[in-house]
């Protein structure tokens, strides 16, 4: 695919919320005429997906994969097919796809695979397993923790205070004082954002799980994980929020 065509596709996707669904789909149909078959099917499937047509999207994703889709688009097609299947109530098939995809070579979409796997497990009533998947992926995003250690060595008070809160909450969990730990971490989650947001989310989710509130715990972990993704940020955050709605 040429750089000019990629740029045109990117421009069209920018219009998604600015034109009618009918116009968007028509423009996608025209723009993708010159693409290789697998890429054409994928882009059209994504267009139907984003305009609320999961059945059509799923069919096109399957055709794109069967046509030999490669590279990042192949992995995106698997993730998006699984998401469409979730929306169609076919969570078991979605889980099979995502579990297989998790075994593929690592890339920038690992977090997205984990996030949708966790959501699918929640659909199946397996929130604790979903939480484990989400927490494992979230831990992988905490590389800024090393920079935080350097900041501590320089004596910066904010980082020292935040670390003390996290460690105090962890100690309280270990001592069985989970309610107090929850109060500490819930307050800390409302503090100004920094490189330790993910760590706060991890321990907050663990504490909620200790209290038997696995669905809320999963929502916290997935919301934090969504912020680290190169793609699917908004949709992932929306799905995480939906978990909280169903826990009320």
Image: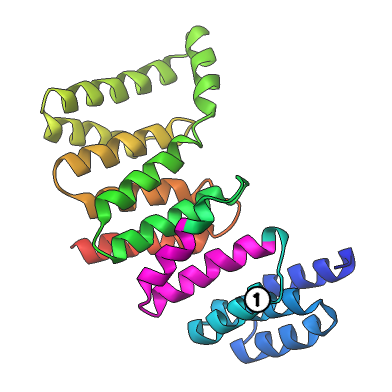
Q: Which sits in the foreground, 93 or 136?
A: 93
SS category of the residue bearing label 1: helix
Q: Position of residue 139 (x, y in %)?
A: 44, 35
Q: Quadrant of residue 246?
A: bottom left
Look at the image and give the residue range highlighted in magenta: 73-99
Q: Residue at x 37, y 55 (%)?
A: 118
Would residue 155 appear left or right of 220 to someone viewing this image? Answer: right
| Side of 226 where 131 appears, left or right | left
Q: Main secondary structure of the magenta part?
A: helix
Residue that badge 1 annotates: 66
| Residue 81 falls within the magenta-colored stretch | yes
Residue at x-position 44% and y-position 59%: 116
The residue at 42%/35% (across/down) is: 197
Locate the N terminus by quadrant: bottom right
In the rendered structure, does residue 172 fall within the stretch colored magenta? no
State the image coordinates of residue 17 (x, y, percent, origin top left). 60, 76
């Amino acid at each position: 695919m040429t750089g000019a065509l990629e740029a045109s596709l990117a421009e069209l996707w920018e219009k998604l919320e600015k034109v009618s669904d009918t116009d968007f789909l028509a423009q996608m149909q025209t723009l993708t005429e010159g693409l290789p078959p697998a890429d054409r099917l994928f882009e059209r499937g994504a267009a139907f997906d984003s305009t609320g047509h999961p059945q059509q999207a799923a069919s096109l994703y399957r055709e794109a994969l069967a046509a030999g889709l490669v590279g990042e688009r192949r992995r995106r097609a698997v993730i998006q097919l699984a998401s469409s299947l979730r929306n169609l109530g076919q969570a078991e098939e979605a889980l099979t796809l995502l579990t297989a995809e998790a075994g593929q070579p690592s890339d920038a979409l690992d977090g997205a695979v984990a996030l949708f796997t966790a959501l699918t497990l929640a659909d199946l009533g397996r929130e604790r397993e979903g939480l484990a998947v989400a927490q494992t992926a979230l831990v992988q995003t905490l590389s800024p923790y090393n920079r935080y250690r350097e900041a501590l060595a320089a004596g910066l008070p904010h980082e020292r205070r935040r670390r003390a809160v996290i460690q105090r909450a962890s100690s309280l969990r270990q001592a069985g004082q989970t309610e107090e730990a929850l109060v500490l971490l819930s307050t800390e989650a409302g503090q100004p954002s920094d490189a330790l947001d993910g760590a706060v989310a991890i321990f907050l989710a663990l504490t909620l799980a200790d209290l038997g509130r696995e669905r809320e715990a999963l929502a916290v972990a997935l919301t934090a994980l969504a912020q680290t993704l190169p793609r699917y940020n908004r949709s992932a955050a929306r799905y995480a929020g939906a978990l909280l709605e169903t826990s009320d």
